[in-house]
Image (cartoon, coloured by chain):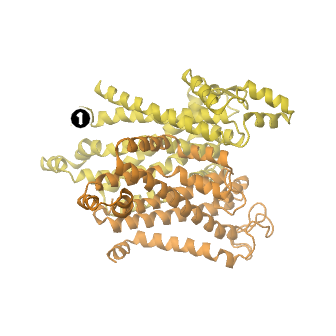
Chain colours: A orange, B yellow
Amino acid sequence: MEVVRAYFRSPAAIVGLFLLLVVIAMAASAGWLFPRDPLALAGRPLVWPFTNPRFPLGTDNSGRDIAAQIFYGARISLLIGGVATVIAVFIGIVIGAVSGYYGGWVDNVLMRITEAFQTLPNFLLLLVLIAVFGSNINTVIIAIGIVSWPAPARLTRAEFLSLRNREFVQAGRTLGLKDLKLIFGEILPNALPPVIVYASVVMAVSILLESALAFLRLSDPNVASWGNLIGLGRDVLRVQWYVSAIPGIAILLTVLAVSLVGQGLNDALNPRLKGR
Amino acid sequence: MRVLSLAGRRLAASIPTLILILVGVFLLLQFAPGDTVDAMMAQMGGGDARTAEDLRRFYGLDLSVSAQLGNYLWRLVRFDLGFSAIYGKPVATVIAERLPATILLMTASLSFAFFFGIILGVIAARGVNRWPDTLISTVGLIFYATPSFWFGLMAIVVFSIYLQWLPAGGLSDITSTATGIWRVLDTARHLVLPTLTLGLIFLAIYLRIMRASMLEVLNLDFVRTARAKGLDETRIITRHVLRNALLPMVTLIGLQAGTMLGGSVVVESVFSLPGLGRLAYESVVQRDLNTLLGIIFVSALLVITVNFIVDLVYARLDPRITTGV
């Protein structure tokens, strides 16, 4: 409860939570407000926003409703942000925990691999993964998760290194607890808070990564993704710039919301670092 | 000298990493549907199986995976990146043509982000929790959340289409025959928008880190001593605080060199710059796997080089690092 109160003391955190709830509400209400397929033809192409009450945000180059694509896009962005983050954080925690707990050669090998992933520009690796496994939405999500795990892994490892010789771990060892039980039952719950906070960064980056892929037309073309719409709007940028502008604002606000919530959580969980 | 040997040791330690990356990506690319020969046949408009087989033998694609990998690594040792069937040139040549634009863009963006990151970070830290700080931090958060390609497109709409101040793409004016200083100025004009676009997110990160590390250093004892000696605030900031507060910033450059290279893929596509990032994108689309692998190799080398330089700078900023205290 203390944490919740601390969270709501920061106006930025409240704004972030509000924005995030709006995006979630958009995703939830998409099917109800726009029962038709958002990628189906809806009317004349390139209708400007606020000119036709049927299309509050106008239509894109091929006459698809932009408002519907924005609402359905919220689903895709949240899906990608959520699932890719879970994948990245899960891999990161397992590798970081094993590496930090055992140390020695296990740590050496795992950190070498982590370093390799960090040396290779992650967007390039993402391109390679997409080139190899294709750009269906599932592969895109998994690929984004695979390129994002090194940072959570390093964070978890650092936490484990500082926790593994504490009294409570030694006590657990004396009681004869198995390594697995010690790692996941005893140490991990204590190492988790900073990793959870960092997950907000991973989520923000995942949403940006997918939108960049979609903009390059390497993401799944069969889903209503904000990045796809920006990429389409590029063709008519000269006059109908709103086709690109509107989804961009949606991405900006979503990523902003996720980062503000992350920062709010961070401040609430580590009051000592407030304002940093 | 100690600095060099320390950095040299770090450099040597990155060789296994490099090999790991190459082997990993090479094996990964074996799963790619279709190889270079398929792409070439498609470009030629099809052909019979015999031609394909001959081509495969010619490019050494008929060998076992491990033999191919061995061949590739052995050629790399001699700095031979293989041949790009799509461009009809050695991969090394193709990459060398594209590298300068990317390095130019990265250097410009990094300088922009670093310089303004320091200035804004210092201003924010000095007025902590007052309006300049709130304003700068908010702007930083918004920049951080802005997709770079979208910012680039909007910058084109505003500055190239409506105001017509800056060119919308390319590295230089193709109709221009300018030489010398005019050519440099022309290129600089073309690079303004791409630099801002690529640098924006890094500016946001740098100003945040700078602010945090300024706040931390400002609370240390030696700053209190300097104040007690009666030094004026500007001198304390420039001579005492800044140097120490810069350390995390320099670390960050090394950590983010890779991210920046990745970002240049998108930015170069937006502004149609003939750079490495765009080449990476094209080679994915055209299934030019040899070139893609070459780009991976060169990018990893670039990141390692940046980290090497960062190590040198780091030791210069903080002599304790080399003396091992």
Figure quadrant of residue B293: top right
- Residue position for label 1: B324
Q: Amino acid at mark 1?
A: Gly
Left or right of A95, for residue A30: right
The number of numbered badges drawn on the structure is: 1
Quick check: B65 above or below A104? Answer: above
- Residue at 34% in and 73% down: A3
Figure quadrant of residue B278: top right
Quick check: B89 above or below A173? Answer: above
Q: Where does the N terminus of chain A fall, quadrant-wise?
A: bottom left
Q: Position of residue A225 (x, y in %)?
A: 66, 61
Q: Looking at the image, which residue sits at the far top?
A: B78
Q: Is residue B187 visible?
A: no
Left or right of B262, for residue A239: right
SS type, badge 1: loop
- Residue at 68% in and 40% down: B282
Quick check: B264 above or below A170? Answer: above
Left or right of A80, for residue B111: left
- Residue at 29% in and 56% down: A163
- Residue at 55% in and 48% down: B197
Q: Is residue A32 visible?
A: yes
Within-10-Å neighbours for mark 1: few <14, some 14–19, many 20+? few
Along the viewing direction, whichever of A170 and B207 lies nearer the viewer: A170
Figure quadrant of residue B84: top right
Along the viewing direction, whichever of A158 and A178 lies nearer the viewer: A178
Q: Looking at the image, which residue sits at the far left?
A: B229
Q: Position of residue A197 (x, y in %)?
A: 41, 62
Q: Where does the C terminus of chain A fall, quadrant-wise?
A: bottom left
Q: Position of residue B135 (x, y in %)?
A: 41, 61
Q: Position of residue B183 (x, y in %)?
A: 59, 30
Host chain of mark 1: B
Q: Looking at the image, which residue sits at the far front?
A: A176
